[in-house]
Image: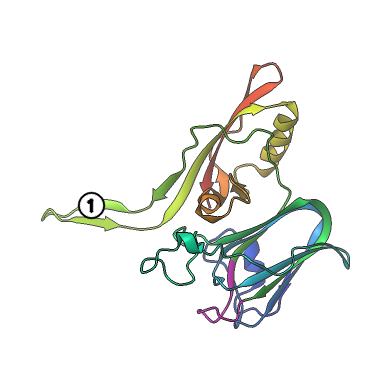
Amino acid sequence: MNATSNALPITNTQRSERVKVWRSTDASQQVIDATLPTPTYLGAVVLYRHNLSPGSRVRLELFVDNDVIYDSGSVNISGLIPLGDFAFGVDSWGATSADIIPTQQAAFWMNALLATRYRITIDDPDNLDGYMEIGRIISGQVISPKFNASYGLQLEWQDAGEHRRTEGGSLRTVGEGLSRRLPIDLDWLDATDRARFTAAILASGKNRDVYVSVLPEEGGIDEAEYAFLARRENNYAHTHNQFNNWRSQLIFLEV
């Protein structure tokens, strides 16, 4: 993997620690080129924890050797608040509908294609930071059940702050930081879905990061709130509750 410029190395995008990021030296056009270890089916590529501005544009290309097999074109990834929903005097100019979510991200979804490498081209000349930054770049296969998460989905934003009372009775809050916890009940898995999930979950284990998106391609805050990089908290299990149907619960913790 290489990038046009590296104030902080592009290889940081393959590390789990939040403090490890890629950063360009300036706001000129940046090209990130990644060669996969082996030919791999790609159904998604995600730019995770980025600082790209509302006016930025990103192009994703997939290759087999030097042949382009997918080209997104140069697209805006910000999700600007539609004019009819824009609150003048409240929302900042250029605000996006997902600004309130601490983690900014952009996902490219496509039908699975066998690729040997991919290229990301970023144009963001108006970036107020004066540089581009990405925490993680995620690419790989997508597993999506025929029937989605069951009703009762409960997303918890876990706040690391702890309240402590002083001797004088004042309330102090120590620590800060947000992370998500999401239990997903899959109550309608047929034999094919169960087999696919078993293979994927056992391969990833608890120690590997997976990207979870409950509402892919929905856009806005709905997609952003229910999409994050995670690890599995619970043991993997499934229950055969009726003919050709299994139930399983997966609990994900944000990395």
Residue 105 in view in this figure: yes
**Left or right of 163 on screen, residue 233:** right
- Residue 26 lies, with reference to residue 12, above or below; the image says below
Front position in the image: 104 or 181: 104
Quadrant for residue 61, please give it. Answer: bottom right
Q: Position of residue 7 (x, y in %)?
A: 60, 79
Residue 39 in view in this figure: no
Q: What amino acid is at disc 1?
A: Arg
SS assignment at label 1: strand
**Left or right of 166 on screen, residue 70:** right
Q: Position of residue 57 (x, y in %)?
A: 64, 71
- Residue 172 lies, with reference to residue 191, above or below; the image says below
Give the number of callouts.
1
In the image, the segment drawn in magenta is 124-134
Q: Residue at x 75, y 30 (%)?
A: 192
- Residue 222 lies, with reference to residue 198, above or below; the image says below
Check the image and name the residue furthest to the left.
168
Front position in the image: 12 or 126: 126
Q: Residue at x 37, y 52 (%)?
A: 160
Task: State whether the magenta stretch is mostly helix, strand or loop.
Answer: loop
Q: Position of residue 28 (x, y in %)?
A: 64, 83
**Left or right of 6 on screen, residue 95:** left
Front position in the image: 76 or 246: 76
Quadrant for residue 53, please give it. Answer: bottom right
Quadrant that contains the N terminus? bottom right
**Left or right of 68 on screen, residue 164:** left
Q: Is residue 98 magenta?
A: no
Give the residue pinned by disc 1.
164
